[in-house]
Amino acid sequence: MVSVRFLLKDILFYPDDVLRKVSSPVESHEFGSPMKKFIEELYSSMDKANGIGLAAPQVGVLKNVLVYKTVGEKEEVNDYLINPKITYTEGNTLVEEGCLSLPGVFAKVPRSVKITIEAQDFEGKPFTKTTECFSSIVIQHETDHLVGKLFVDKLSLMKRKMLLTKYNRNSRRN
Ligand code: NI
């Protein structure tokens, strides 16, 4: 058996190839304390980058794990999903999104309003969650990362070209 360690890199930026790869499910031997630690590291990478969501492939780990911020009673709290599957969607909305892997560019993309997700906790225990609005959009964005999709893929060809031109101009400047 392979010993379980998840090595974090810095956040990868578009057009890094890793962002286009399909991640694998977390397997039974990978749950437990190393997974808990990995999730904590993902939270800290997300916080350092001032993000509201981060998927494991964005730090070079091709596993179905994502973290996100949700709004608690008074403040934002960190949450996570392992092996998430969106099993139900309802409604349509257009929401402005950005991505830590494409800093500095934002665009409105179509999303569902309400979603139901089946996922597992860090010990492998399955659970179901239904969410709307803020968390729902972040989770849809992050689950796309797990199959190598980025929010720019949802734009028309012309809008995508404009946005990527702006992105490339920004990256040259920095
Ligand atoms: Ni993103």
Image (spheres, grey):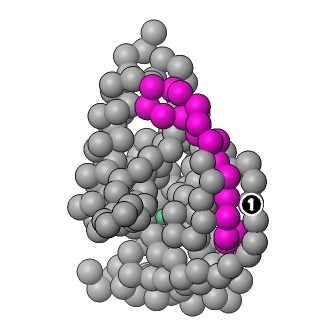
Indicate the quadrant containing the C terminus: top left, top right, bottom left or bottom right: bottom left
Categorize mark 1 by other alpha carbons within 10 Å: few (<14), some (14-19), many (20+).
some
Side of 155 where 6 appears, left or right:
left
Q: Which residue is mark 1?
A: 89
109 shown above or below 50: below
The structure residue drawn at horizontal position 73% and vertical position 48%, both measured from the top left corner, is 87
Percent across and percent down for residue 103 are: 38, 75
Examine the residues drawn in magenta and state their main secondary structure.
strand
Q: Residue furthest top?
A: 1
Q: Position of residue 166 (x, y in %)?
A: 46, 88
Left or right of 44, for residue 22: right
Q: How many marks?
A: 1
User: Can you say which quadrant of the picture contains the N terminus?
Assistant: top left
User: Residue shown at 49%/83% (left/top)?
Assistant: 106
The spot of residue 71 in percent (x, y) is: 41, 65
Is the residue marked 1 within 8 Å of ligand 1, measured from its CB? no
Q: Nearer the viewer, residue 34 or 68?
A: 68
Name the residue: 34% across, 33% down: 36
Which residues are drawn in magenta? 111-128
Residue 125 is left or right of residue 172, and the answer is: right
Q: Is residue 24 magenta?
A: no
**In the image, is 23 to the left or to the right of 5?**
right
- Label 1's element? strand
Res 15 seen here: no
Three-letter amino acid code of the residue under disc 1: Thr
At x 58% / y 31%, what residue is drawn?
A: 126
| Above or below for 72 versus 6 | below
Q: Is residue 163 visible?
A: yes
Give the farthest residue toward the front: 73
Where, by quadrant of the figure, is residue 35 drawn? top left
